Amino acid sequence: MADGPGTQGHGGESLLYLTDEQLRQGIEAMFFAYRGFTADPDRILQSMDYGRAHHRAIHFINCAPGTTVNNLLSILGVTKQSLNRVLRTLIGDGLVESRIGRADKRERHLYLTEAGKELEHKLSDAQRARMRAAYRQVGPEAVAGFRQVLEAMMDPDMHRHYSGLREARG
Amino acid sequence: MADGPGTQGHGGESLLYLTDEQLRQGIEAMFFAYRGFTADPDRILQSMDYGRAHHRAIHFINCAPGTTVNNLLSILGVTKQSLNRVLRTLIGDGLVESRIGRADKRERHLYLTEAGKELEHKLSDAQRARMRAAYRQVGPEAVAGFRQVLEAMMDPDMHRHYSGLREARG
DNA sequence: ATTTTAAGTCAGTCTTGTTGACATTCCAAG
DNA sequence: CTTGGAATGTCAACAAGACTGACTTAAAAT
């Protein structure tokens, strides 16, 4: 506990970046940044009676068209009851289409309709705009470091989903 | 829309890190990483009938002892009513002390009690452990980049709070 | 034929956000 | 001094979105 600089038992390189104070700053930065990260889509969603839950569903259905409910469940890390409430409204509003699987008729495969794709674009454009501005401001090396830290912070299960989605897209 | 590589209008340096696909990956990484980021404290809190909101309040009261309710409000970005419910349980459980301001008797100044400090340590130790593991894994340059991107992603208001807290601690 | 799996539903609870109404305190203009 | 805002904080009621648990239906696997 309460590690100071140099108490890591290593030697040689500077370990200043591992002090409790540095870690605390990282924690706060993560907190404030995540708020900024979700702020723009949240504003759009609020004006149409949707919430962040709808955004997440739309995002991952768009990434992996034809995904099953079960698969989406494990990516989002929520219960099926919780997801189902969201999905029901999205299907009812004609943003998502649910097709019965032809191989396994128990499964429902999820797709965005044209209206769904339109909303997805609106939301991700807003989010990407902020991300792009930040990326452009700091340059490619900082972005590479950013991504490395984020990946290292994920739970192994989440990292599996993350790389899975990346590979599926090439 | 749908920027490809090199459509930024700049020239020279590689802008591959600004493609829509790269930005999309950054968005997903942020989503999954934030879940990991909060997972450990969430587990601790769940076992004691508290939630993430309690954690946030405790964290920032610890950073800025004697802060007023109003100040905490603007940092956390919630309504005073929402914060008040959380604060009431924390005060009732003896983790936070609320002292009436001597200059302005409308204000309440907030402090952690010994029990409050104990819980704060437990929570931040868990969160720092994950952060430290990630930091150690990727090295100081990546960490510097991580912090740069996070700062660039914050809303200006949030960035003000963030630097404010940093300066207050030296 | 039985069991397991995928999906959906209904009911109830909890956390945490919201708005609205209200009490207290401060301060400044009359 | 008094009175009328403005600021601060509290109480009450409600909504979104997460959770659990029990249950149904249909299809697949054994």
Image: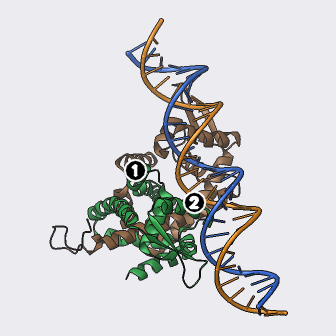
Chain colours: A brown, B green, C orange, D blue
Taking A11 as reference, is C20 left or right? right
Q: CA distance from mark 2 to mark 1?
A: 21 Å
Residue A31 percent coordinates (x, y): 47, 65
Q: Quadrant of residue B36?
A: bottom left
Quick one: B135 or B10, which is closer to the camera?
A: B135
Q: Disc 2 marks which residue?
A: B85
Looking at the image, is mark 2 or mark 1 nearer the viewer? 2
Quick one: A4 or C29, which is closer to the camera?
A: C29
- Residue at 56% from the left image edge and 37% from the top image edge: A81
Chain ID at mark 2:
B
* On-image quarter of the N terminus of chain A: bottom left
Q: Residues within 10 Å of mark 1 (few under 14, many from 20)?
A: some
Mark number for residue B43?
1
Can residue B125 be seen at all in this image of the molecule? yes
Mark 2 vs 1, N-terminal side: 1
User: Are the two marked residues, 2 and 1, in contact with CB atoms closer than 8 angstroms?
Assistant: no
